[in-house]
Amino acid sequence: MFFLGQPPLAGRRRASPARSFARCIRSIGAAFAGAILALSAAAFAAAPESAPAPAPAPVLKKNPAKPKPAPLETPGSVYELAVTPKPRGKVDELVFGRLSQLGIAPAHGCTDAVFVRRVFLDAIGTLPTAAETKEFLASTAPDKRAALIDRLVARDEYADYWAMKWSDLLRVKAEFPVNLWPNAAQAYHRWIVASLRANLPYDQFARELLTSNGSNFRVGPVNFYRAVQNQEPASIARTVALTFLGERAEKWAPDRLAGLAGFFTQLTYKGTGEWKEEIVFFDPHKPPPARDAQPATFPDGTVASFPPDRDGRDVFATWLVDPRNPGFARVMANRVWSWLLGRGIVHEPDDFRPDNPPTNPALLALLESEFIAARYDVKQLMRVILNSQTYQLSSITRSPRPEAEANFAFYAPRRLDAEVLIDALNQITGTTEKYSSPIPEPFTFIPDDQRSIALPDGSITSAFLENFGRPSRDTGLESERNNRITASQRLTLLNSTQVQRKIEQGPKLQALIRNRTAPREIIDGLYLTILSRPPTHDERRIVSARALSGPDGRTAAVDLAWALINSAEFLYRH
């Protein structure tokens, strides 16, 4: 088990987690501390930081004992496979080829238990249930991983989770007294969810955002032009460059920014009789810029030529999504890769510039061409990445070199998003969360069973979301989300009454403990529910012997649940 504050990062020494966790164990129960610390030592011994150490030399005996069969759960088998990974397709050939050039060995492949948890979290932002985990682990179908990926991208949670991601980039948040209003934010979010659920091709998704006209309350995508710092053409141009070109236009030459702004000079906003409603539309009668103004110019430097009665936004969108303009597909392919593997081939994914080249140009070119060939089908691009051996590597590195992470030699662990984390806690315990918004409107009523990943408006929040780094959605930058673990987060998980009540009173967790009589059933149920894997033989033995055999089995089970929830194995994608 990886403990709080000690993510299973490659290259990290494995001796420190037990010592660092000892400071926190007091709140879990002194009687259980020895068992948990012993459990941590056993788990970390099972997860070597590099290639497995050579076995000790055998001791020769006159009458050697017959070797015993290996146990079902052997050290190292929880997180990684023992076989050397081999490329499955062009993606892996390019990644492994680059690693070979650098003299870096790729990590071993991840186990089924690691994969099922990882792909659920990465594809739909949701933990697998214990039943889903057991079903997947029990399957002997050779294509069960590919089949699971297909099922996940077809689930409703797919649209909810990726709408959350897009809402971060598109700044879907009600603010007072400017920008979006709650019903506009919800209209915007509904359109994003519907587009993802219908698997709208990305070129059409971008075109609708750029060219729509109508009421901000009724035509969701027009809010792209409302959720900006201001409504000046230059500000809109900066937002367009960041969202679709992955470039930070404040670093551009003034003439280049002015050229892009030229496509938005005839965009007009008109109020209606309804409070905070605006009509966003192209106005061909709006006076054009002065003659000495920079003409509308594409970012590649080509001056655009179009009649005054044609919407400049349509001209730009046609240029943007043209397959002959590879930058559009390249930026999105890099963004999807970053979302799934924790790091872009160009890093950061919204900072494309000549002096920030891709770590693997051939890999990025391949993903770009695959995306275009799939007619901008984002789900198909995700399938290509999720089915690759590169994505399915273990998070345990075999090289201490810093280039290993930048070249995808292992799966990079990262803390769960705030929304995913609170949803996981609620799913495990059967509890709910209270949300509120400072915006004075009745549209912020949230049902008790609302999942955090499906919140339609960034202004709707909770103390937990704020504490765990949910982005404010002010800039549209990927880096606005902060997933670094903090002291306040540690204290919240270890000592807050909120988490305590969820664990001690949550109906699902209590039913799991109450309805099972044998200690083994309780232990297995808690591990499958919280960590999405069965316990190892040593973990089961230690907990059974040191905790659940005592007179107060319920308290020991609650303490075990608390310890597992505070482990980095739970808090991190790995």
Image (spheres, rainbow, N blue to C red):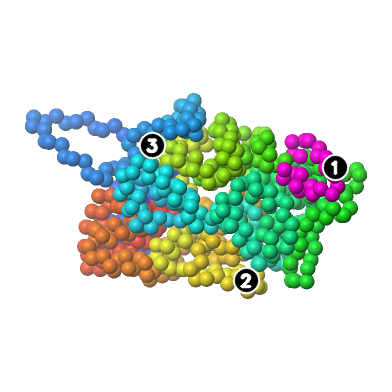
Residue 176 visible from this viewpoint? yes
Q: CA distance from mark 3 to mark 1?
A: 55 Å
Q: Which residues are magenta?
A: 298-318
Q: Dots 3 and 2: beta carbons under 8 Å?
A: no
* Sequence-first disc among 1 and 2: 1
Q: Which mark is residue 249?
A: none
Q: Amino acid at mark 3?
A: His
Q: Secondary structure at mark 1?
A: loop
Q: Nearer the viewer, residue 16 or 481?
A: 481
Task: Give the answer, above or below, for where 548 lies relative to 574.
Answer: below
Circle 2: residue type: Phe
Residue denoted by label 1: 294
Camera-near label (3 vs 1) is 1
The answer to whether the residue labelled 3 contacts the one labelled 1, judged by CB atoms less than 8 Å apart, is no
- Residue 475 located left or right of residue 5: right
Relative image position of residue 45 (x, y in whole percent): 31, 43
Q: Is residue 154 magenta?
A: no
Instruction: Measure the alpha-carbon separation of dots 1 and 2.
Output: 43 Å
Q: Is label 2 in a helix, a strand or a loop? A: helix
Dominant secondary structure, magenta:
loop
Identified by mark 1, the residue type is Gln
Quick one: 63 or 116, which is closer to the camera?
Answer: 116
Q: Residue at x 53, y 57 (%)?
A: 160
Q: Position of residue 504 (x, y in %)?
A: 37, 69
Q: Which residue is mark 2?
A: 443
Q: Residue 42, percent across and down? A: 29, 47
Q: Residue at x 26, y 65 (%)?
A: 516
Mark 2 residue crowding within 10 angstroms, few (<14) / some (14–19) / many (20+) = few
Q: Residue at x 12, y 36 (%)?
A: 66
